[in-house]
Amino acid sequence: MRYLVAAFRIATAAIGLYTVWYYLFREDSTLIETFTVQSNIMLAAVMLWAAYALLRHLEEPPAFVKGGVTLYMVITAVVYAIVLVPPVNPPAVLFGLPSSRLAHILLPTLAVIDFLFFDRHRRFPWRNALVWLSYPLIYCTFIVIRGAIAPQLGYPYKFLEVPNIGYGGLVKNVAMYTVAFWVLGLIVVAVDRRLPRRLLWPTTVADDDVAVAPAAEVDPAAAG
């Protein structure tokens, strides 16, 4: 089972890296600035890390890191489904899917599958849902500052386009998305806390390291 899980993670990472490569080298290199491409890069990296740790009997990625990447992939899928306008008749790239669906649907689905079935659970404190917001907020801050300094570079998302929505609209959008992402983070934590420690595959290095305290020895002399 260990090798099957590692193979799943390597395959996920390979799909992620191929999708990122297609975005940057076949479509537009400036897409590196999008949350989608960055979250897909993070997913590929953490999946390779997890697979290597699994095969080498090492500690897997920290729960905080793995959970955060899972949340960012969920955000990628939700924003794509609700906010973004998908391209019209895009060419198929892999498995008959265009790059947009690979990045926004397939890879988030694989990330959630790995989280649900192959990760250890009951490791997330509730505060993670709040701390995980640091990356999206830093990302928004960078995009807004860059747009103010170099407006010719544009904005990757319309809900961050200050020239069109103004700073009042920006604050409103950031507040709305922050609350929404926080709720998604709470859902991830709640699911983690409700699931059994390991849903499908029960053995990890960390599990092996949990020692059962030996029973107290009784001194025969004292007992007499």
Image: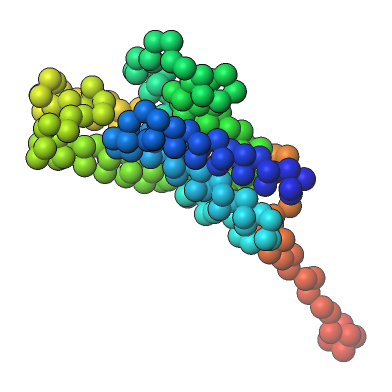
Quadrant holding the C terminus: bottom right
Q: Residue furthest bottom?
A: 221
Does residue 52 sit above or below 222 in this rendering?
A: above
Q: 119 or 44: which is nearer to us? A: 44
Task: Say left or right for 51 vs 29.
Answer: right
- Expressed as whole percent of the image width and height from the top left, the position of residue 100 reads 44, 23
Q: Residue at x 72, y 61 (%)?
A: 208
Q: 197 or 223: which is nearer to us? A: 197
- Expressed as whole percent of the image width and height from the top left, the position of residue 121 reads 61, 45
Q: How many marks?
A: 0
Classify residue 35 by image quadrant: top left
Q: Residue at x 70, y 39 (%)?
A: 199
Q: Residue at x 84, y 84 (%)?
A: 219
Quadrant holding the N terminus: top right
Does residue 134 sit above or below 71 in this rendering?
A: below
Q: How is the image coloured?
A: rainbow
Q: Residue at x 38, y 43 (%)?
A: 132
